[in-house]
Amino acid sequence: MVLDADAAYAALKTRDPRFDGRLFVGVTSTGVYCRPVCRVRTPRRENCRFFDTRAQAEAARFRPCLKCRPEIAPGLSLADSSRSLADDAARLIERSVHGGDATDMAALARRLGVTDRHLRRIFADAHGVGPHDYLTTQRLLLAKQLLTDTAQPVTAIALACGFGSLRRFNAAFAERYRLNPTALRRSRPASAAAPALRLAYRPPLDAEGLLGFLARRELPGVEQVDGLTLRRTLAWPHDGGIVAGWFEARFDLDRHEVALTAAPALAPFLGAVMRRVRQGFDLDADPALIDPVLARLPVAQRPGTRLPGAFDGFESAVRVVLGQQVTVKAACTLTRRLVERLGERIETPWPALTTLFPSARAIAAADPEVIGRLGIVRQRVRALQALAAAVATGAIDLDRGAPLEATLEALRSLPGIGEWTAQVIAMRSLAWPDAWPASDIGLLNALAPDRDRETAAQRSQAIAAITAQAQAWRPWRAYAVMRLWHQLENET
């Protein structure tokens, strides 16, 4: 943590939302730890201990506050810390917990190319606790949120959060939080029988820019932007089958939260849905780090710019491929036709939402001539199907937890996927905040507007010039791209 204890206490006294998710306070007189935005009476300075993470607070034997609910605090984006093995391991642990998958530390170490012992050592150095403690914290906090915000059976929650049995879950919950899971549920107000899940973010957040970007690219049948609300269908492969349903996410700008409701069919997978919504809206971004860097941009300031990310990494990548060398409107038309031809139907509460985005397996198996008749040129069909086949077989993982450089290298090896496509996929599907699609025509028009009938050499010089200019915006160049795109779209 950058703050010293006195500065941390000052942030606590003012309930500064900029430090939400970056700072937690353990109160020795109560044994509880809180977010800095907690609305209870501020504890005395001598009773406060400050922690970087929730796992550190729980390792020190503090239990989460029932008022401010540390489990809904925003997390950290990929560039909030260095890209070390420990950070990669933490993201993979969080992904496994929220995806409902088993987590084997020995397998995790092998995936990262280190020994189990080395992983434990570097993880403890970076995060203040061992990977097993970090895993337990993630599981218990997810369980606490589901107990509070849903009516799911306790047994179902225990299994969804990775506990092998109800007995093991009850023991872990009571040992960490000194509270029985059933007792926590009974403490919920009767009027909140099935409230929406709450996802917090750090203000400011440019909701107009974020939702406007999504609205201009709205895909009929799959998604709908309605004021501060996004509704959409969602599907992904799981254990050899398909998880499918819908969700509705509504911004509460006064509370700095998103209220999330999902289809009953997604109840066992709410952790995965929350994770996808957090990435899709970039709720873990920290404007206090990003906005000062973006102040150097030669465009109007938009505090709280977010990266519109991926609710489904493969879908976002397909839309990027279909957007090669065409306008946004043309790309949306091609994507709509693809959905109408290969997407599966689904029932939702809204007449406007009727279809699931086609799966990687469906696109890979489709007749190329069928895709071509949708108006998609042959080179693009080839790129789409190569991408779909790589994702369907697991050769490429389009998730923010995937290794960046290896994934970019695999993308570049596919036919029809060049550097621009790989960088935009990194920005949207992999949530990489320093992605820089240097050859993007929008960036060139915004940063080098005096070009006219340029030669290939002049274009290369312009790309080199704006890339050199963009060094000042690192490690947030993808956010700079969004600011520049917002500016161009507002001018047209």
Image (cartoon, helix red, strand yellow):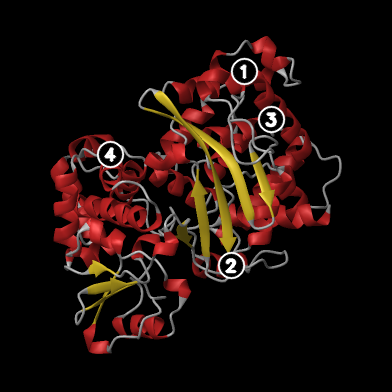
Q: Position of residue 346 (x, y in %)?
A: 58, 30
Q: Amino acid at mark 1?
A: Arg
Pointer 1 residue: 382
Which of the marked residues, 2 or 1, is nearer the chain's N terminus? 2
Pointer 3 residue: 335
Q: Quadrant of residue 177?
A: bottom left
Q: Position of residue 472 (x, y in %)?
A: 57, 61
Q: Amino acid at mark 2?
A: Leu
Q: Amino acid at mark 4?
A: Leu
Q: Which mark is residue 439?
A: none
Pointer 2 residue: 253
Q: Is residue 118 visible?
A: no
Please give the name of the residue rendered at 44% of the width and 55% of the height, measured from the top-left corner. Answer: 77
Q: Which mark is residue 112?
A: 4
Left or right side of 144 for 257: right
Question: Observer-nearest residue: 256 or 314?
Answer: 256
Q: How many badges with numbers are in the image? A: 4
